[in-house]
Image (spheres, rainbow, N blue to C red):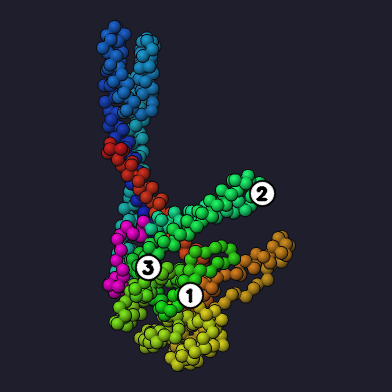
């Protein structure tokens, strides 16, 4: 709700500013045209003197024409003066005097039209300014309230978050947007060349194919360079979101397999398993994790902060207390089992979600040593070495194991078979059921949280689409910069500087 109110407030404030600038320009137009009656009288008098043989009046006629072109609206008075000046230049003085016979009445009509336009623009601007002020005040209050709720955890994380210039993220978001555009353009060109190659001239086919591949490769290179540099630190992620975070704990040795990129049956992905999984967890809150010390760039996925190697335990304990959910990926490292022990000793059972790798029975045996009842993890977990099962707990710390794997195939409805044919229906259902490991994990975590009464139906959807945040954020930034530049241009016109 806070994000929705903030977005509506931004749009409303922008519209209100635009309408206020428009009203200011209308007021400026009225003020500039207030001398029109005197200018019209002077133009008519100069025209009469020129008709009487006063050649020097021709300069006054041209000056009057210039004034009306610069200050009069598009209307009767401006048209009459311009036509009369043209007739004078062609020697048709009598026709010019006929054209300005009703100039005074035309000026009054134009002034009345400008006054009506000013009144209308003022009223519309006021109608928008009032809700804009209310919404902006509400958004700022909600933002302050959200930040106050997470102020302590932001202070803790900010001590260990890397420092970067303020312009770094916007610049690399723009670069990422350019990379995505090149990627899309290259894929489109290559696809068109493949589809229509037999109809194209050989040279055009070659250019489309080579150019498309070059654009695609350039897009990939740009994204590889820009996306890690546009990633938010943990402190900035908490400031931007405002909710209590999800603390993601894992062994640094698991970063390699989490960084793998899996293509689904329906699209080619650029996003790692960790990106997709943390995007799904974003339905609960911003995901933060400890980064590997000494890494030159943060891995994409959970927002990183960096703890000292010799004194990391107190900070992790404090973050466990302040987080709303703890997602811990099991492994063989002693540090992970210390964290499991601390969560068991200090936190309620509902806060902990364990991710167990498949094919490691020693992990299952080690886990049972920390629990009041056996988990049966070795019998239930899937075979995926990244994540074979998701484990949650009831208030007495009794484990509930949820296997991770593809959802069972469902038979397509008979109506679909009749309408689209057996082959098409089977192909469609096969495509729908072929998902990446991150999607299987997101679905298992969603079901595990639902068994605890926490329903986050958007988790699997986020795993698919929310990973495109860098693309949409970059496009939004481009659009925002364009709209801001246009608004500044209008303001400069109002001030007479543009």
Element type at mark 2: loop
Quarter occupied by the N terminus: bottom left
On the image, numbered disc 1 is attached to which residue?
Answer: 257
Residue ID for mark 3? 297
Residue displayed at 57% across by 77% down = 405
Q: Is residue 474 left or right of residue 448?
A: left
Q: Position of residue 257 (x, y in %)?
A: 48, 75
Question: Front-most of 75 and 426?
Answer: 426
Spot occupied by residue 148 in the image (x, y as percentages of width and height): 29, 69
What residue does disc 2 label?
A: 198
| Image x and y of residue 92, in percent | 38, 10
> Callout 2: 10 Å neighbours few (<14), some, many (20+)?
few
Q: Residues within 10 Å of mark 1 (few under 14, many from 20)?
A: few
Whole-percent x and y of residue 253?
43, 79
Q: Are marks 1 and 2 in contact (CB under 8 Å)?
A: no
Which comes before the other along the chain, label 1 or label 2? 2
Q: CA distance from mark 2 to mark 3?
A: 46 Å
Residue at point 61% right, 67% down? 432
Gap between marks 1 and 2, in whole Å? 42 Å
Q: Is residue 168 rendered magenta in the image?
A: yes
The residue segment tinted magenta is: 152-171
Residue 297: quarter of image: bottom left
Query: Mark 1 touching mark 3, by CB under 8 A?
Result: no
Would residue 101 appear left or right of 446 to someone viewing this image? left
The structure residue drawn at horizontal position 27% and vertical position 28%, both measured from the top left corner, is 34
Q: Earlier in the sequence, mark 1 or mark 3?
A: 1
Label total for image: 3
Vertical side of 398 occupied by 237: above or below: above
Cβ atoms at labels 2 and 3 below 8 Å apart: no
Residue 340 against residue 65 in the figure, above or below: below
């Amino acid at each position: 709700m806070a994000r929705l109110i903030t977005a509506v407030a931004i749009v409303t404030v922008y519209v209100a500013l635009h309408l206020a600038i428009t009203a200011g320009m209308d007021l400026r137009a009225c003020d500039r045209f207030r001398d029109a009656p005197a200018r019209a009288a002077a133009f008519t008098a100069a025209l009469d003197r020129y008709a009487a043989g006063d050649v020097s009046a021709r300069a006054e006629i041209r000056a009057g024409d210039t004034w009306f072109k610069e200050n009069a609206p598009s209307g009767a008075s401006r048209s009459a003066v311009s036509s009369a000046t043209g007739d004078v230049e062609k020697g048709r003085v009598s026709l010019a005097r006929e054209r300005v016979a009703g100039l005074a009445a035309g000026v009054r009509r134009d002034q009345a039209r400008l006054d009506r336009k000013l009144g209308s623009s003022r009223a519309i601007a006021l109608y928008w300014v009032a809700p804009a002020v209310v919404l902006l005040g509400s958004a700022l209050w909600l933002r302050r309230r959200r930040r106050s709720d997470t102020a302590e955890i932001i202070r803790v994380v900010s001590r260990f978050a890397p420092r970067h210039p303020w312009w770094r993220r916007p610049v690399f978001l723009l670069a990422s947007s350019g990379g995505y555009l090149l990627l899309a353009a290259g894929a489109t060109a290559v696809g068109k060349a493949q589809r229509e190659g037999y109809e194209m001239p050989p040279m055009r086919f070659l250019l489309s194919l080579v150019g498309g591949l070059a654009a695609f490769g350039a897009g990939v290179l740009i994204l590889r360079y820009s996306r890690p540099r546009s990633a938010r630190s943990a402190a900035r992620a908490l400031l931007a979101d405002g909710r209590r975070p999800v603390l993601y704990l894992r062994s640094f040795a698991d970063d390699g397999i989490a960084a793998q990129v899996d293509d689904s049956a329906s699209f080619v992905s650029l996003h790692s398993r960790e990106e997709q999984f943390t995007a799904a967890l974003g339905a609960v809150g911003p995901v933060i994790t400890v980064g590997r010390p000494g890494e030159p760039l943060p891995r994409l996925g959970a927002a990183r902060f960096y703890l000292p190697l010799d004194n990391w335990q107190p900070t992790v304990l404090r973050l466990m207390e302040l987080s709303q959910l703890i997602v811990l990926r099991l492994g063989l490292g002693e540090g992970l089992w210390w964290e499991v022990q601390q969560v068991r000793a200090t936190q309620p059972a509902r806060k902990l979600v364990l991710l167990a790798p498949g094919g490691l029975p020693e992990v299952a045996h080690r886990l049972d040593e920390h629990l009041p009842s056996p988990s049966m993890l070795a019998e239930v977990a899937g075979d995926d070495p990244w994540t074979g099962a998701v484990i949650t707990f009831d208030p007495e710390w009794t484990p509930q194991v949820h296997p991770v794997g593809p959802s069972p195939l469902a038979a397509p409805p008979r109506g679909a078979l009749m309408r689209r044919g057996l082959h098409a229906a089977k192909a469609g259902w096969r495509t729908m059921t072929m998902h990446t490991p991150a999607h299987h994990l997101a679905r298992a975590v969603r079901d595990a949280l639902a068994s605890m009464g926490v329903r986050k139906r958007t988790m699997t959807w986020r795993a698919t689409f929310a990973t495109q945040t860098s693309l949409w954020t970059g496009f939004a930034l481009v659009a925002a910069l364009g709209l801001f530049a246009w608004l500044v241009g209008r303001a400069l016109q109002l001030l007479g500087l543009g």
